[in-house]
Image (spheres, helix red, strand yellow):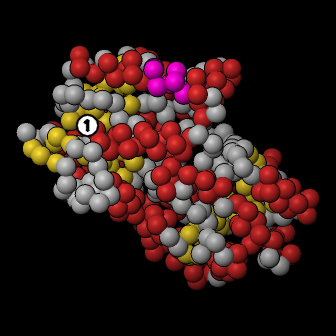
Amino acid sequence: MRVALTLDAVDAPLTGVGRYALELATRLPALGADVSYLTRTGVLSEGAFTERRLMAARGQPRRGPILQSLLGSANQFPFMAHLAHSMRSLRDSLLPALECDLVHGTGYYLPAARKQVAIVSFHDLSPLRFPQWHLPGRAARLASEMRQAASRADWIITDSNAVKAEVLDEFGFPAQRVVAIPLGVDAVFRQRAEHECVEVLQPLGLEVGGYSLMVGTLEPRKNHEKLLAAYAGLPLDARKAWPLVIVGGHGWANASVNAAIERGVREGWVKRLGFVAAGTLPILYSGARLFVYPSLYEGFGLPLIEAMASGVPVVTSNRGSLAETAGAAGELVDPEDVASIRQGIERGLEDASWRETSVRNGLEIARQRTWSSCARQTLALYHLAVSGQRLERAPLSNADGDCAGLSRH
């Protein structure tokens, strides 16, 4: 099986999409796949991929700050968006000469494969369904790429059944060619004894079992504002006993969230750590009394499964993929209702019987969610896709129905 994977998202700091691409690129060769690594500018050598993988693991961006800033400005400046598009077009022109059976766009974008079977991963549909949660220009660009990818794809992979249902509704793609393959959790996220955590937590002013944790970029859909309002409604002694630790990058559209965080810091019940090193994050999970993740929308919820694998009770949203990922481990709350979030936190902190059940169920679910399993299921889909016939696709429409616009050749 000869496979070409896109690795555009594999860069530090790794996002969930970057982690997914990196895990597949690392594990598929061990399962017997012959993998080519595609970037914006062409095909990576084995040595170049190894270097990129190591830099991502160290949290070291491949590009200097000036180039990083310029490429990140594609959402605001049309000429940068045009440059990024030109780089991808150059890369796509190499595909006809690339000896592979299948091309897999690992993050929304799918190169224009002409002779290879084409698969794209849609991790969520927020650019199409909730553009207001993205930076100006970014949602429109991603939405355009996703519609183009859907028109090119023979198969679509999602991370959850919730997103699979959205894909079927949005694109009218045939149900038998949309496959939900759950993401995995890295082995570094595990239960730890107290003595394994103390050395990392003490310099941060934290104690094992002495804080609640939220991990996520400060962006609108993560719902920090309502989380902070809910936490502020807890009795002061509970907030002081178990302060809320917030981990994640700076994000955008978060002035009110930053103000609420600063109030909590001044009052002594919020600790803001920002982006933390890769070696610190697993310890923060293991040492937490409770993980709270009331996000408004996710395609899977990697932080949720990481907390579950770490033996921590979880409180999360009662909608979409988060309820699916949490399963029997989660205390589900209405993410738009501050009182509901507060009640979930209270139970998560103080209900000993529920906490024990949440930990037990979470560990069992996490044991089944490995990156090895994700890679094996993905490779099995590759074989199925290549063994079948290509599909000739007409433009997709929500009104077309599951099988409209498709013919075999």
Task: Give me the residue at 52% from left, 21% from top.
Answer: 83
> Is residue 94 at least partly visible in the picture?
yes
* Place of residue 310 in the rendered image (x, y in percent of width and height, measured from the top left): 55, 58
Q: What element carries label 1?
A: strand
Looking at the image, is 44 positioned above or below residue 28? Answer: above
In this view of the protein, can residue 383 be seen by the observer?
Answer: no
- Viewer-proximal residue among 130 and 300: 130
Does the magenta portion include 86?
A: yes
For the C terminus, the image quarter is top left
Classify residue 140 as left or right of residue 371. right
Residue depicted at 16% across the width and 42% down the height = 391
- Is 88 left, or right, of 118 in this rendering? right
Q: Where is residue 114 in the image (x, y as percent from the top left)?
A: 22, 28
Left or right: residue 403 compared with residue 206 = left
Residue 211 in picture, x, y percent from top left: 74, 63
Q: Which region of the structure is painted magenta?
A: 80-87
Q: Which residue lies furthest to the right in this view?
A: 266
- Quarter residue 315 falls in: bottom right
Q: In which quarter of the image is the N terminus?
A: top left
What type is the residue that disc 1 sits on? Answer: Ala
Question: x and y percent of residue 202 in the render?
Answer: 79, 51
Tally the numbered discs.
1
Q: Secondary structure of the magenta portion, mostly?
A: helix
Q: Mark 1 points at which residue?
A: 118
Q: Which residue is drawn at 47% across and 52% down?
A: 128
Image check: 208 left or right of 4?
Answer: right
Q: How crowded is mark 1: few (under 14 residues within 10 Å), some or many (20 or more)?
A: many
Q: In this view, does 218 lie above or below 263?
A: above
Front-most of 161 and 21?
Answer: 161
